[in-house]
Image: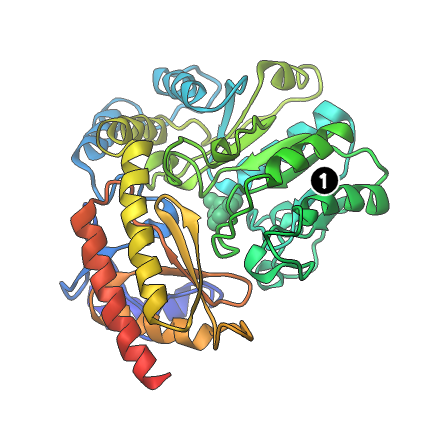
Amino acid sequence: MKKEAILAKQKDYLWPNHILYYTDPLPLDHGDGLYVWDVDGVQYLDFFAGILTNSVGHNHPHVVESIRHQLDKLVHSSTLYPNETHVTLAEKISSLVPGKLQTSFFTNSGTEANETAVMLAKAYTGEQEIVALRHGYSGRSALGMSLMGHSTWRIGSSEIPGIKHAINPYCYRCPLKMKPDTCGVACAEDVEDVIRTTTSGRIAGFLAEPIQGVGGFITPPDEYFSIVSEIVKHYGGLFICDEVQTGFGRTGHHWFGIDHWNIEPDIMTMAKGIANGMPMGNTVTTVDIASQLVGKGLSISTFGGNPVSCASSLSTIEVLEKEANPDHVADVGNALRLGLEKLQERYSFIGDVRGKGLMQGLELVQDRKSKEPAPKVVDMIFEATKERGLLIGKGGLYSNVLRISPPLTANHQHIDEALGILDDAFRLVQRDF
Ligand SMILES: Cc1ncc(COP(=O)(O)O)c(C=O)c1O
């Protein structure tokens, strides 16, 4: 189908609130590794990976083969019948997650994984209140939107009661107007303040992303999660760590983002990169916490643990282990980071460079003193990078953060190619700035 026909049908038959990137939206046709092609045959280097989801690139032969193999065997059975792919994947994930986390409940998306986590925390503690962070993104259900710390992503007013928001550790725009070297991580104490002033003082849990993804790759200081996790424990809550964007080696050195802070969450949620694009969410917890659900009611996910998605996830993890383990991500991510910092020296609209591994964000501002967000510059860079054959992402409450997050199989040549295109695009934009 030609591009114009696809766009016409999109307009006529899909809800208008589907966000489309680019002034002239880009219908993609096929992919191979780090590259995708649009329906006109134009090639792009993909540095957004379907929103941090194509962990091992497009159509990796091992992943494709595992999916084909499973398609020939069994596409669906429901979780009423045990299946080899389901149990093998659960066992594999338990070997990657920190501490006593062991047992999984698979669903189909990050939203569902977070829903499941909150349900578990409430059932386990017998409490109802949850503390989340401002600027967080948790999903598109009523609960997901209630947990959300972004007005932009909250549609309607179907608010779930009992959710309170603490300030986030956004050092570049400190909500307390303090300086990172002298603040004593005061933002972490706000979690206690929120619990003591806006809840019953007994919470079911605290939910946070190790690095806020949609929020613009906001990366907390080193001490943040150890302070917060103690506060949460003190008030009887479970720490729910949302690894939907940060999981599976994305942040380098470790399999999961929270490992950088050396914290063992009580519940971990994951999706996106878990199965290289096949739909899957997962909620992992300890045997003790999961066992508390027994006798409290039944739960089922028709498509959760789907054998094809499980096969895709297993083969994705195999490829990650062989070709793109967390040390590889740290190495390539370091090259990306150094390149971005060099660009920051040259282009005054780059206010902040942050993130870890292959999850790097650039916050763009009108000028570094006022830090006034520059979403229009992001738009200009978007068009310029697309024209030069590079796909990137954006985010942040003010839509002024470039999100750079290629498949984890990216190598140094890919990084150099992307940095070269970004440099060209920035130069063009600087001229008109
Ligand atoms: C951190 C985080 N949690 C949850 C979700 C929701 O995931 P899904 O879109 O798969 O429902 C997202 C989606 O972007 C996310 O980034």
| Outermost bottom residue | 432
Query: From the image, which quarter does the N terminus lie in?
Result: bottom left
Determine if residue 29 is in view: no
Residue ID at (45%, 43%) = 245
Horizontal side of 76 relative to 397 (left or right) equals left
- Closer to us: 406 or 157: 406
What residue is pinned by disc 1? 130
Where is residue 11 drawn, in percent x and y? 39, 70
Looking at the image, which residue sits at the far front? 182
Instruction: Assign the C terminus to one quadrant of the image.
Output: bottom left
Height in image: 99 above or below 258? above
**Residue at (40% x, 23% y) in the render:** 77
Check the image and report above or below for 37 versus 325.
Answer: below
What percent of the width, then of the height, locates residue 199?
83, 42
Nearest to the observer: residue 297 or residue 150 = 150
**Which secondary structure, mark 1?**
strand
Measuring from the top left, give residue 222's x and y in whole percent: 55, 40
Left or right? Give the position of 107 relative to 161.
Answer: left
Neighbour tally class for label 1: few under 14, some 14-19, many 20 plus, Cα within 10 Å: many
Q: Can you tell which quarter of the image residue 277 is in?
A: top left
On the question of residue 395 being in view, the answer is yes
Residue 126 position (above or below residue 400):
above
Question: In the image shown, does 227 or 183 lie closer to the viewer?
Answer: 183
Q: Position of residue 401 (x, y in %)?
A: 45, 63
